């Protein structure tokens, strides 16, 4: 028997391209175009190499406490991990252990089915409505757990808290995870519901709104019992998941609330302007409440537009999924970056006679 017969084989998640091209405009992975706060920058200067010889706090106490204070929670209601991907992967292992399928949208964050396959979790990808919204009626059947992003990715559409509550009320016996990677760009968090629904886990990240994708910090919030179960699984795999710089700098990022609100407001303002200009050019897109726009033009190929922009060193995200192949997901960058994108798009449309 070949040793390969005992290998767990999965089709891995494919992250957005990380190009390294001179004078590029990188609008393909929903990073924040602005630097982290001054507090983070000052803390970077004060990092002591001597601190690196010791293990970091395995409980990430300083960051957990700072997040709890910021959101008005108790420390035991907060869990942190190495980016929200780490938090979500641990949540899949912890909460999705039924023989019934978990539910998530058919068009959504493409890591969900990868984790389900990796951990041998049965799942059902539920189609969205024609307008890309989630229909809560589709989630009122027997299942082993539910997860969906809000706003959704890659569509950018925000669901109301009323819709979230409909799903929660219909599913009191399973854990419902709301993945809020983009909630700071215009949505209302489901965090307000965690005291009402003990089965609700809300997951957020520092990668988008807090300009710290490179530090890999994510966190979950919920009732203390959910958080304890997450920590039990975490401590059964790797006690020291958060490195010392991430803990230190993460605390500083949370402290500077004024800067956080300033940069998210800038991105929202740029997003709304870009939506208006894309609409004038004939593009169609869901009404994004995230830091990206998911756009298609009815008269040009989404794949060809993606390739044309790439030749100009402007990188946007294109998906091979046949359901959305005519769309490109465009991260909101600085105003100058978006002006350059729009200029190239206009030139391309003129060349096509559109």
Image (cartoon, rainbow, N blue to C red):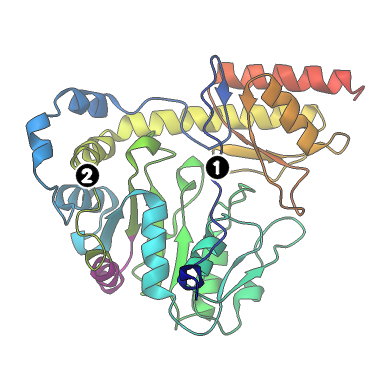
Q: Residue at x 58, y 53 (%)?
A: 152
Mark 2 or mark 1: whose residue is earlier in sequence: 2
Q: Which residues are magenta?
A: 221-233
Q: Name the chief secondary structure element in magenta.
A: helix
Give how far across and how far down residue 353 sits, in percent.
92, 22
Q: Residue at x 51, y 30 (%)?
A: 267
Front residue of 136/9: it is: 9
Relative to residue 155, is residue 101 drawn left or right? Answer: left
Relative to residue 47, is residue 302 drawn left or right? Answer: right
In space, the residues marked 2 and 1 are separated at their CA atoms by: 28 Å
The disc at residue 290 is 1
Relative to residue 347, is residue 189 drawn left or right? Answer: left
> Image quadrant of residue 46?
top left
Give above or below for 49 relative to 23: below
For label 2, the residue is 243
Which image quadrant: the C terminus?
top right
Front: mark 2 or 1:
2
Residue 226 within the magenta-colored segment of the rendering: yes
Q: Residue at x 21, y 64 (%)?
A: 76
């Amino acid at each position: 028997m070949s040793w390969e017969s005992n290998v767990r084989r999965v089709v891995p998640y494919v992250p957005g391209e990380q190009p390294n091209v001179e004078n590029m405009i990188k609008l393909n992975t929903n990073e924040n175009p602005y630097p982290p706060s001054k507090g983070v920058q000052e803390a970077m200067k004060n990092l002591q190499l001597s601190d690196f010889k010791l293990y970091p706090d395995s409980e990430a106490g300083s960051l957990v406490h700072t997040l709890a204070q910021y959101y008005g929670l108790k420390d035991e209601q907060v869990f942190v991990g190495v980016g929200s991907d780490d938090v979500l992967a641990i949540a899949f292992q912890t909460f999705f252990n039924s023989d019934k399928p978990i539910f998530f949208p058919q068009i959504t964050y493409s890591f969900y089915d990868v984790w389900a396959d990796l951990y041998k979790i049965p799942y059902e990808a539920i189609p969205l409505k024609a307008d890309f919204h989630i229909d809560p009626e589709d989630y009122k059947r027997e299942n082993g757990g539910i997860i969906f992003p809000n706003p959704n990715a890659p569509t950018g559409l925000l669901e109301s808290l009323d819709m979230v509550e409909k799903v929660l009320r219909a599913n009191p016996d399973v854990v419902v995870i709301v993945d809020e990677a983009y909630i700071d760009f215009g949505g209302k968090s489901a965090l307000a519901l965690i005291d009402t629904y003990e089965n609700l886990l809300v997951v957020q990240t520092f990668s988008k709104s807090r300009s710290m994708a490179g530090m890999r910090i994510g966190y979950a919030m919920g009732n203390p019992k959910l958080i304890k179960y997450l920590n039990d699984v975490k401590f059964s795999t790797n006690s020291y998941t958060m490195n010392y710089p991430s803990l230190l700098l993460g605390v500083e990022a949370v402290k500077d609330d004024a800067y956080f609100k300033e940069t998210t407001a800038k991105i929202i303002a740029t997003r709304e302007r870009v939506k208006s200009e894309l609409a004038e050019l004939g593009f169609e897109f869901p009404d994004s409440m995230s830091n990206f726009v998911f756009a298609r033009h009815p008269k040009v190929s989404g794949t060809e537009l993606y390739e044309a922009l790439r030749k100009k060193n402007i990188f946007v995200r294109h998906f091979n999924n046949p359901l959305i192949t005519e769309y490109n997901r465009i991260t909101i960058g600085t105003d100058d970056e978006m002006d350059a994108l729009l200029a190239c798009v206009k030139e391309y449309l003129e060349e096509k006679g559109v």
